[in-house]
Image: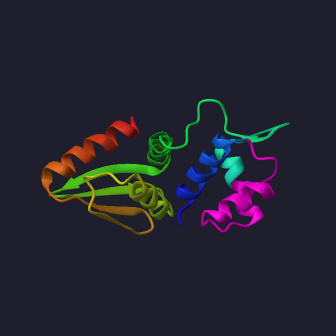
Amino acid sequence: MSKLARQNRILELVQEEPLASQDELRLRLSRRGFKVTQATLSRDIHDLGLVKTPEGYMAPPGETAPDAGAPRIARLLREFVIQVRGAQNLLVLKTTPGSAQPVAAGIDAEGWPEIVGTVAGDDTILVICPDRKAARKLAAHVEELLA
């Protein structure tokens, strides 16, 4: 399971109710099929900006779980994508070195209907669309998220 999916699940869990400890959060994740170590969970808590209150871990104000993907994918794209180029029904996204695979996983997790699939290398993502129209629409959407 991807980091993005795991972090979305963490946000969903803490929005359902505050969780008193990392161990409680880890157990809830485990019940939902996410086996994580304490170190991974600590990094996720930090990345998500979760807040520890007397009641337990809570999402920072303004975060929402089911719809949090759009802001998160926008952040991923802005941080790591350098260039977007179209070629027929394909898009080529150039990224910073080493970031293509996590960005592609984030794109895949979005489930955008314009995408048939992605292939990621070290610093390049090939996005396959069913046709030119879908590729143009997706390129415009990605450019909008980059702005």
**Residue that sits furthest to the right in the current view:** 54
- 21 part of magenta stretch: yes
- Residue 5 percent location from the top left of the image: 53, 57
Residue at (22% x, 44% y) in the render: 137
Q: Position of residue 48 (x, y in %)?
A: 65, 45
34 relative to 99 in the view: left or right: right
Q: x, y (%) of residue 26?
A: 73, 60
Name the residue nearer the viewer: 102 or 34: 34
Q: Nearer the viewer, residue 37 or 81?
A: 37
Quadrant for residue 42, please give it: bottom right
Question: Quadrant of residue 41 in the image?
Answer: bottom right
Residue occupying the point 40% across, 52% down: 110
Residue 109: horizontal and vertical position, in percent? 43, 56
Q: Which residue occupies 73% across, 67% down?
A: 37
Q: Which residues are magenta?
A: 18-43
For the stretch drawn in magenta, what is the main secondary structure?
A: helix
